[in-house]
Image (cartoon, coloured by chain):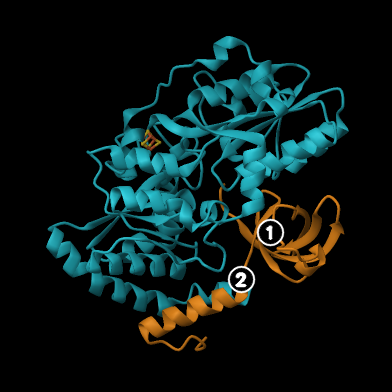
Amino acid sequence: MKQAMNFRDPHRVNRLIKCIQAKAAPVAERLGRPLQIMEVCGGHTHAIVNTGLNQLLPSSIELIHGPGCPVCVLPTHAIDQAVALAEYSNHILVSFGDPLRVPGSQHSLLDAKAKGAQINTIYSPLDALKLAKSYPNKTIVFFAIGFDTTIPSTACTLQMALQQGISNFRVLCHHICLIPVLMTLLKQQEIQLDGFLGPGHVSMVIGVQAYKPIVQKYHKPLVIAGFEPVDILHALYKLVQQFSTQKYAVQNAYSHVVSATGNQPAQQAINEVFISGVDAKWRGLGLVPISGLSIRPQYRSLDATLLLEKKYCTKQESDPTYCKKVLTGSLKPQHCPWFGNKCTPHHPQSGLMVSSEGACAAFYSSSTKAKQG
Amino acid sequence: MCLGIPAKVISILDKENGTALVETGGVRREACVSLLSLQGKSINNLIGEWVLLHVGFAMAIIDQQEALDTLALIASLDGIDANND
Ligand code: SF4
């Protein structure tokens, strides 16, 4: 697309940074500290660190990398469940590539695969459905993870499986929703947050209006942003404008993709297949109220948790405390004592170091690039 | 893994199941378009449109005019001509 190029234009980037600086400096002076803005989405973290935007921004703004990478917050027990299901001889576990290296309490999925478990990586849940049709004698278990962006695709796939009577397909659902975790973060007194850069692709599903309760309740501005440098800076500009007028609202700086009410057919598919508002565990953050989903009774025959032995349903989490601090913005990834030594992308201690959208992995890859360059 | 990528709809493969052939970065693949809101229009209207593709599902139609408007707005804000590249 021609426009995509325009959203990277260096002149525009530089001018926007100057505009941001002009507005942010007096606000930071008034506060006596830099503005703390959380980019919620891992896609933003990746884009910001990779393009070096974080180094170009004025000192009046500090970006906090939020918990918005589903691989980073995937709890240990989810991995343990997936590993257990993969180890059955007549099962094939299918997963997106990212979760494979996330450590479980004993093994990662990659370890299980090396030991002979059948684990296939896929690009789309539709591939899982195709696999189920090709192997009628095997049970195909799809490890469904991801935020609101990914939930509709799982919902739609479950609808297709039921309609088409594909009885050897199961879903291990570890989907989570973003808004409840923002609410949880805002309730925690120790976290200093002034506003949010809203996630572009989650928002295309849930819509702009979904954030209104956050702004109304906590009086923090949120601006939805796309993923090109100009998109991100434009959203930051709108945020600092709000800080300077001290009038806070939800704004949409990604209106070519995100609408006020979001994707309605996708929301309907989610409601039809899932019960929302279930408490869910997040790696590093613990229990986040009403952030999870469970499969509705009509789709019970496709629910993989029913294949699990009880012991896999109640596992304790054992994560380094550093990860929690990074997830909530109170520790910078590169300041974690394990960063780059005990914890690297090859030997990750947590999902934060696994996914390219995880803050630790993003900083690790940019620091090694800088060393090589 | 939450990122969507822009893709152009080339043709409709199966109207009933809502599948289409889409192209992204020169690569063509099958995608599900059944989650898009067509607002009463025929699925054939999608041909030639840009969509945002996520794990094989088109999740939003990209509004070209809105994209251009955003750029024009930014240009007016920073005083640069939006067409200077
Ligand atoms: S470097 Fe590793 S241990 Fe430290 S916070 Fe990041 S993921 Fe956790």
Say which quarter of the image contains residue A317.
Answer: top left
* Chain letter, disc 1 residue: B
Shade of chain B as shown in the rendered figure: orange
- Determine the residue positioned at 63% across, 18% down: A84
Q: Is residue A132 left or right of residue A62?
A: right
Q: Are marks 1 and 2 in contact (CB under 8 Å)?
A: no
* Ligand 1 occupies quarter: top left
Q: Position of residue A169 (x, y in %)?
A: 77, 29
Q: Which chain is cyan?
A: A
Q: Position of residue A316 (x, y in %)?
A: 44, 17
Whether disc 1's CB lies below 8 Å from ligand 1 is answered no
Whether disc 2's CB lies below 8 Å from ligand 1 is answered no
* Chain letter, disc 2 residue: B
What kind of residue is marked 2? Asp
What kind of residue is marked 1? Ser
- State which quarter of the image contains the N terminus of chain A: bottom right
Q: Is residue A100 left or right of residue A371?
A: right
Q: Which residue is mark 1?
A: B37
- Indicate which disc residue A165 carries: none
Dot 2 alpha-carbon crowd within 10 angstroms: few under 14, some 14 to 19, many 20 or more? some
- Indicate which disc residue B63 carries: 2
In the structure shown, which secondary structural element does the residue marked by tag 1 occupy? loop
Q: Nearer the viewer, mark 1 or mark 2?
A: 1
Q: CA distance from mark 1 to mark 2?
A: 13 Å
Can I make out residue A82 in this image? yes
Say which quarter of the image contains residue A273.
Answer: top right
Q: Nearer the viewer, residue A267 or A89?
A: A267
